[in-house]
Image (cartoon, rainbow, N blue to C red):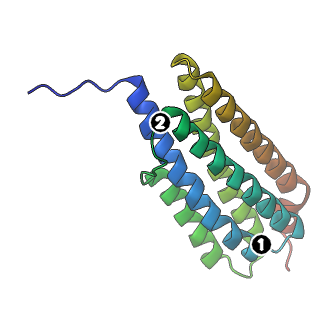
Amino acid sequence: MAKKPKLLSDMFHDTLKDVYFAENKILKTLPKMAKAAHSKELKAAFVKHERETRGHVKRLQDIFKILGKPARAKTCDAIMGITKEGAEIMTDYKGMPALDAGLLAAGQAVEHYEMSRYGTLRTWAEELGMKDAAALLDATLKEEKATDAALTTLAKSVVNVEAEHEL
């Protein structure tokens, strides 16, 4: 018996489940990163992004509703790897001057992954005629880009400079 062909709508739903897992994993990881950070500006950036991430999860739940499907996660190996690297940084650089630079880099790795996924999902939603879902995904994509830009500014102005000096 022939397999049912998988369409773009199937890929959209699978990727949505992947990103839903990723956002929920990030929600568990951000408080640990904020606690580990030395720089009060970096701590504040992680706390702010945790608040935004709660909104991202809510938007994803709204998109599942638009699809008429339950909000279910599918393990995202990419985010598991990125967060594992972040955990290794917290262990290997605990109490070291470069800790915050490593945490910030791990945070940006997460942002870049999310920007890739949200950009793709937004484009697919547009192609599938899902205007409401596309608008929700675009709002999240803009927030992810703004967080990435804020982290870059923080890296250049404070964190990377402090990483070269003793605590």
Dot 2: element: loop
Q: Position of residue 128 (x, y in %)?
A: 51, 19
Circle 1 is placed at which residue position?
37
Extreme residue in the left direction: 1
Circle 2 is placed at which residue position?
68
Extreme residue in the right direction: 157
Marked residue nearer the N-terminal end (2 or 1):
1
Q: Is residue 139 above or below residue 149?
A: above
Distance from the alpha carbon under mark 2 to that under mark 1? 40 Å
Dot 1: element: loop
Whether residues under marks 2 and 1 lie with C-beta atoms below 8 angstroms apart, the answer is: no
Residue 73 circle label: none
Q: Is residue 94 above or below residue 42?
A: below
Q: Residue at x 70, y 64 (%)?
A: 103
CA neighbours of label 1 inside 10 A, class few (<14), some (14 to 19), many (20+): many
Q: Quadrant of the C terminus?
A: bottom right
Q: Residue at x 31, y 27 (%)?
A: 6
Name which residue type carries label 1.
Ala
Name which residue type carries label 2.
Gly
Determine whether, in the image, residue 106 is placed left or right of residue 80. Answer: right
Determine whether, in the image, residue 108 is placed left or right of residue 76. Answer: right
Q: Residue at x 55, y 25 (%)?
A: 125
Q: Position of residue 137 (x, y in %)?
A: 65, 34
Disc nearest the viewer among 2 and 1:
2
Q: Position of residue 27 (x, y in %)?
A: 64, 62
Q: Residue at x 78, y 47 (%)?
A: 147
The quarter of the displayed image where residue 87 is located: bottom right
The quarter of the displayed image where residue 8 is located: top left
Q: Position of residue 110 (x, y in %)?
A: 63, 52
CA neighbours of label 2 inside 10 A, class few (<14), some (14 to 19), many (20+): few
Question: What is the tally of numbered marks visible in this picture?
Answer: 2
Q: Quadrant of the N terminus?
A: top left
